[in-house]
Image (cartoon, helix red, strand yellow):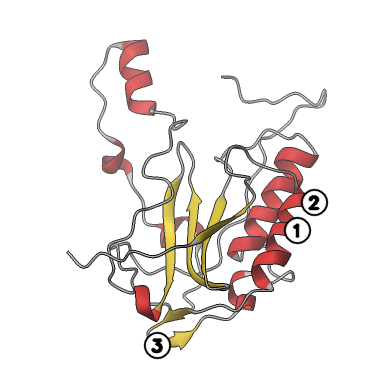
Amino acid sequence: MNEATFQSEVLFVGHDGEKIVDSAETQRQIDRLTALPSKLVDQGEAIQWKALNDPAESRTLLQCVLGDRRERVDKKRLMADRPPIAVATIVDGQVVRLEFYEGHDGLEKTFDLRSAELQGKALPDWMGRDPRAYDQVAFLQQAFGLPIAPPEAFTIPDSELCGSIDLGFADLDDGTENRSLERPAATPLPLSDSGESEVQP
């Protein structure tokens, strides 16, 4: 296995390494990250920061995190999805990797953007498995004692769910499918007239 070893610094967006942060701190993290030179590439072409952080487009990755924190932390709104997180790896003052985690029942790595030197390298992920993930199958089996098909049986491609725009980025090295760098905006849970969530636990 071709494994890379190097000294690096990790920079979070929307997280401080232990917990999620508010939108003000998330914005400071974005500003610090995007002030650094990026070595991220796709098929040999440089990925510009605007493709990842366009204030005019709330679905770009870093703006997606920022928008979530405005709702989830600043406004204390209940959200249907887990909080998205971006994790950047910095080497010699340059961004060489950007992982993006999102998900409904648990966080999963949906993007793993890298520099040319790291393409094809075996690198550890920041998060292998979300320790706070909700196992809906186990819950239904325990609550009702019925055999439930695994989640994979109900999987619907993202393209059918959110109509993502293909920006032409190549397949990721870890085998995940090619997707746009724009994500659907996080959806707050519906609230009743009293301000309470209509969705019961």
- In the rendered structure, are the residues bearing label 3 and label 1 in contact, judged by CB atoms less than 8 Å apart? no
Tell me which amino acid carries mark 3.
Gly
Kindly report which numbered mark, 3 or 1, lies closer to the viewer in this rendering: 1
Q: Which quarter of the rendered picture does the N terminus lie within?
A: bottom left
Can the viewer see residue 168? no
* Mark identifier at residue 24: 2
Q: What's the residue type where badge 2 is placed? A: Ala
N-term-proximal mark, 3 vs 1: 1
Which type of secondary structure does the marked residue at label 3 adopt?
Answer: loop
- CB atoms at circles 2 and 1 under 8 Å apart? yes
Marks 3/1: CA–CA distance: 30 Å
Q: Residue at x 50, y 79 (%)?
A: 39
User: Helix, strand or loop at disc 2?
Assistant: helix
Give the quarter of the image for residue 65: bottom right
Q: Is mark 1 on a helix, strand or loop?
A: helix
Q: Where is residue 48 in the image (x, y as percent from the top left)?
A: 58, 81
Residue at the location (44% across, 29% down)? 134
Mark 2 vs 3: CB contact within 8 A: no
